[in-house]
Amino acid sequence: MATRKLLERRARHQGEQRQEQTEFLTLGAPRADSEPGARWALERGLLVQDRYSGYGPAQMPAEVALALRGADWHAPFEPCPPIVQTVSVTEAEVDREAAAAATAFAVHAASVLAACAASPPARLKSGGVGARELSRIGKAAQCDAIVVRLVLETAYDAGLLARDGDRIAATEGYDAWAEREPAEQLTTLLQAWRTLPLTATRARDEDGKALPALAGTPPCGGCLQARGGLLAAVVALPADQGVRSPVELGPLVAWHRPLADQLPQDATPFASVVREAELLGVIARGSLSRIGAALQADDGEALAAASRRLLPTATSTARFGADLTAVVTGTPSARLAALLDAVADREAVGTASVWRFSPGTIRSALDTGRTPDAITADLADVAVGALPQPLSYLIHDTARAHGRMRIAPAACVIHGEEPALLAELAAHRGLAVLGLRQLVPTVLVCRTPLDKALAALRAAGYAPVAEKADGTVRVEKPRSRRASAPAPTPLPGQRRRSVPTQTPVDVGLSALAARLCDAPPTLPDPDPFGTGVPYGTDTEEIIAGYAKNLTYSDVRQLAHAVDAGTAITVEYVAASGNRTVRTLSELDLDPPHLYAWCHLREDERVFTLSRVLGVMPA
């Protein structure tokens, strides 16, 4: 009866939802304590399971499902799409909002990729760009993490970024891309987004853990289905109509593409894909924009024309204010952005970008070798009108204080009271390898460390004296070298002892014979941990052989839980190095692994015995 109820339930819901229970196989045999009736069905082929991987949800063959459903059963089918609430929108309203979104994304994309080109983000050991690097790039580009992920994934797919060792660096294609107009830049990223084999803004996995960007995940056909279903759903809306809320697009996408993948992080169906389309200007006011229509039709020429119509050309001039700011409307050209980034800090990015000048930013520009006159001339070339007087004062006031003191590299300093002797050292050809440079008549700086410089000067016939850091003379006392006594080599078959042995005492032959006669005829039980307690069961001996980090009491406690089938709590080190405490039940020992039900994840998990650090009662 239990087996029939199980099979009938799975026949009704086969393919509609994921199985709640993941069943594990041990040496090809299904578990006896799985769902009631499952083992009987698995043994007779009414349910099948992947016996190569050893785990996974059990599936029902189509013949069994059809036989249980009956001849009158039909697959669920909704001939009409879901009804959504729509509002009236005009073409001008859609163009205006799409242009604002696409322009802002183009500016953000240029800023994100410029930050990656200036300081390539580091890759994690497991692959991908982690949360720390994403936060750094977002702060430098003044944009959210979702925009950073979208730009990185589309740029990488378009060939603007590539892996370079442990970094993600810009390619030569990026240099050509940065010189193009904003419309052409956006077109390149849009074409990459349309065929991207994943959802770019996916940030969480099924367990809620953070995912890195550019992690090299396998291609996802369901993600492509979701993107295509979104375009198909919006293009099917009545003319001059848009959905009242983007949330209502989810059921439409599911109806147009039943095999599309929904992300676990989405609070509403397909929220991530809808948000990406809004950021790119593909959807505006709940309707398909010109850009979205071109993507839906897969027309590259129409897409380029729509981008040119919605996005303005790059701006090559800036307006400088008396409050030490520079404002650029639209997308700044690559030359203008590079110039302002070199002499000011970017404060805002979007339809209008703002840079702010300060003594620190001007000093950084002077450190790169620029002169105050060159900075003033470059800014005057891109200014709308004359430069404000406060900005000119700031540049020249900072330049006057710049370089008033200098720092030279030196490993040691040579000084004395005879200028002629120091001048002789500086001009000595044989001492040129020391890198001597005369600062004042009585002081030389040397690029060679003190001990090597001291030996070289003495070899050249001079008699220098070394000083300590406080200026006192360093007294050199020779030290005799002594070797440590080697440990005694054990004889063949003899084990090393970690504690010193006691001094043997002389025993007479009669006393030795009496001790040998009183010895037991059998060998004593093994004492694995030096506690005087032997192994209690074979399970303890097996666990102790693999769980090297456990004490004997922990080994006995874990072995008892395995043999008795009781729950246990363990302290565990994951492969990432993070420590965690897990409560486990349904323990199944398969050295060097332990299969168990994890109460934290509410799922079957595999634990490595060598990573278990401690055992506690559940």
Image: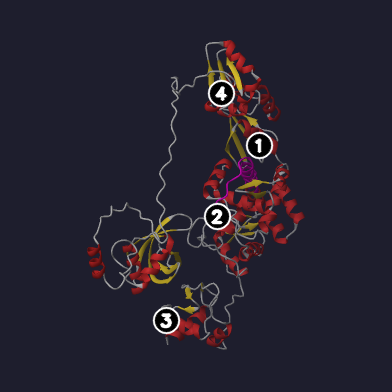
The residue indicated by pointer 2 is 126
Q: In 3D space, how far apart are the residues under numbered discs 4 and 3 (Cα atoms)?
A: 79 Å
Left or right: 209 as drawn, with respect to 312: left
Marks 3 and 2, Cα distance to the nearest angstrom? 40 Å
Within 10 Å of disc 2 (Cα), the crowding (few <14, some 14-19, many 20+) is few
Which residue is label 3 attached to?
36
Position of residue 135 relative to residue 27, above or below, is above
Q: In the rendered image, which quarter contains the N terminus?
A: bottom left
Write the start and end of the magenta stretch as one range: 102-126
| Observer-nearest of 155 and 315 | 155
> How would you classify the magenta stretch by its main secondary structure?
helix
Identity of the amino acid at label 4? Answer: Ile
Mark 2 and mark 4 lie on one chain; the one further toward the N terminus is: 2
Question: Looking at numbered disc 3 in the image, what kind of residue is underneath it?
Answer: Pro
> Residue 122: within the magenta?
yes
Mark 2 vs mark 1: give the one in front: 2
Indicate whether 113 appears above or below 539.
Answer: above
Q: Residue at x 56, y 62 (%)?
A: 270
Residue 289 visible somewhere in the drawing = no
Q: Are marks 3 and 2 in contact (CB under 8 Å)?
A: no
Q: Which mark is residue 337?
A: 1
Q: CA distance from mark 2 to mark 4?
A: 41 Å
**What secondary structure is marked by label 3?**
loop
Q: Type of residue at label 2? A: Ser
Name the front one of labels 1 and 3: 3
On the rendered image, what quadrant is the C terminus found in? bottom left
Residue 446 image-quadrant placement: top right
Amino acid tagged 1: Ala
Q: Secondary structure at mark 2?
A: loop
Q: CA distance from mark 2 to mark 1?
A: 34 Å
Q: Is residue 165 above or below residue 259?
A: above
**3D distance between C-alphas at marks 1 and 4:** 32 Å
